[in-house]
Amino acid sequence: MQREFSNKTASKSSGIFGLIFCFIGIGFMFINVLIGSIVVILALVIFLCMYYFANDTTVVCHDHGFTVTIDSNRKGTSVNDYAWKDVTDTLYYEKESAGENNTTTCYFQVKTENGVAFTVYEMRNFHELIEIFNQNTEHLAYFWEKPTGMFKTRYQKQNRIPNKA
């Protein structure tokens, strides 16, 4: 088994927000060149800040554990290998954004004895990542279960039934 999961925060999010604000600034230029120019400059500053401070996180799961690679334009690249038995806690949580268009972002965090190994937000195959951790961390007293149903998305913490051998 070798599965890779990635959050490309620095690359994707900064580009998307930068482009959105840039188009808004160009739109404002038709009304007022000064305001439009300020918004375009602001878009560039937001893009550069987000690109500089954000991290790209990649988690590669394999038979004996998982490898976490964090690429940061500010701190460089760090690569850490963990065994499945090193996992002391997993956490699934959701955050709702403020404003009119309340969107909910799902997160999955894995902790080891040395602290947080990684935190990723919902991405392609997010549910598969949680399932792989459920299967390989049987030493934890719980697992994360997704309720069935069309509109049910929030995972629920379930207690494991101990094996009687």
Image (cartoon, grey):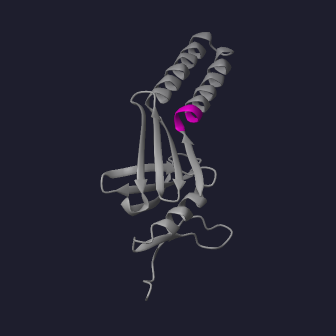
Q: Quadrant of the C terminus?
A: bottom left
> Residue 149 versus residue 9: which sits nearer the camera?
9
Q: Quadrant of residue 113?
A: bottom left
Rendered location of residue 35, percent (x, y): 57, 15
Rendered location of residue 72, percent (x, y): 45, 32
- Please give the range of residues in magenta: 9-13
Identified at 61% across, 68% down, the residue is 152
> Residue 89 versus residue 101: which sits nearer the camera?
89
Rendered location of residue 62, percent (x, y): 53, 55
Query: In this rendering, is residue 93 above or below 23?
Result: below
Q: Main secondary structure of the magenta part?
A: helix
Q: Could you tell whether 156 is left or right of 126 in the image?
A: left
Query: In this rendering, is residue 133 above or below 39?
Result: below
Identified at 55% across, 22% down, the residue is 43
Total tally of numbered discs in the picture? 0
> Residue 114 versus residue 107: which sits nearer the camera?
114
Rendered location of residue 148, percent (x, y): 63, 73
